[in-house]
Image: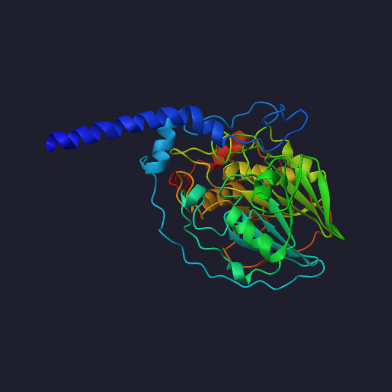
Amino acid sequence: MIRRALRILFWSLLWLVALAGLAVTIVPRFLDRIYHDGPATGHFDGARFLNPGIDDTRHVPTGGSRAGFLWKQATGDDDRPEWPASVPVRPSKPAPRVEGDQMVVTWIGHATVLVQTHGLNILTDPVWSDTAGPFGIGPRRVTAPGVAFDDLPKIDVVLVSHNHYDHLDLATLKRLWDRDRPRIVTSLGNGAILNGAGIDSTALDWGGSVPVGPQARVHVTRNHHWTSRWFVDRNRALWSSFVVALPGGNLFFAGDTGFGDGRWPAEAAALGPIRLALIPIGAFRFEPGQMRTGSHIGPVEAVEVFRRLGAARAIPIHWGTFRLSYEARDTPPRLMAAARDCAGMAPDRFAAAQVGQPVSVPPIDAPLPPSPATDAAAMARCLDTPAVRALR
């Protein structure tokens, strides 16, 4: 009996090894995709997109091996602080439309935000799925959407920043497309993914723009990130931020981004005064004390991005919904508030929103005074407090 069991185990392991070896040669070729075919540019080599300058998005966030990093991410075996299994949410039901210069903003969770102004309903990176990954496998939603899908007003414009599963959720986008036929704007290559699901979109390069209403235009702008749906299709599609040019001040959506060369916020600001910026602050810590990664700005860099944008107001996003990294759930907004105070910014200019609770953003009625530059060493000294050091 034992010998038979050992024989079965041996052959099972042998088959697994054979299949793994076959997968190494077949699966990558099968899963790789050509999402964009066009001439080479300063950020496209004819096959894959890249970040201008030194690209630090390929580095493992912990500096160790990729296999060890993936194992710890999958198992949580890195002494990470606990997250709650779920978070209480008081959802709201938005108005059908918001007319004129009034702007009402509802954070739905992660990078999903509903912006209502001038009769337009704009939705960023819509994700209503319970998990962020292929085939329902991936980080599970901890915070329920702040607006039930069926309570969404008719959506006119959807911005899709890149193709990672926590930003490009085909199930949600298909529901939106079938229901509302919104104008979906994304960056090069991502249109092929959407088209494969029967969804029409407008895919543009950095610097491209398209009108989305009588008084509104979407500009696709640069940020610093990477893309992949299947590992081997890395950077076959482009990543981006967006500026929506509007009367009363522009809307800036950073998408998902690292700091990179730090010049891209000024490029967005050059398109006009920014009334509201949606800036990511989470998924920045993969080991104790870490403040940033190549792919994700942390709260301290988010404050600097806000300063360089010269925005009137900002809402932090990309935290507290899906666990993607090491830090505690409430570390990003607490560290952001500390960095904002160290930078001498008024608390109401960059303040965390509650999921599902609408926020009114006043129009810009006067030129914005420039925010004073903050020396990195001075910021580090200011943040060197017991309260900040205790954040995990």
Residue 75 in the image: state x and y as whole percent. 37, 43
Most foreground residue, 132 or 89: 132
Left-right relation of 201 to 324:
right
Residue 249 in the image: state x and y as whole percent. 81, 56
* In the depicted structure, whether residue 47 falls above or below residue 177: above
Residue at image location 57% in from the left, 54% down from the top: 110
Residue at image location 66% in from the left, 61% down from the top: 176
Decide if residue 135 is in sight here: yes
Residue 219 in the image: state x and y as whole percent. 79, 47
Most foreground residue, 338 or 286: 286
Left-right relation of 246 to 129:
right
Task: Place residue 33 in its image quadrant.
Answer: top right
**Which quarter of the figure is the N terminus placed in?**
top left
Left-right relation of 138 to 113:
left
Total residue callouts: 0
Q: Residue furthest left?
A: 1
Residue 358 in the image: state x and y as whole percent. 64, 67
- What colour scheme was applied to this rendering of the protein? rainbow
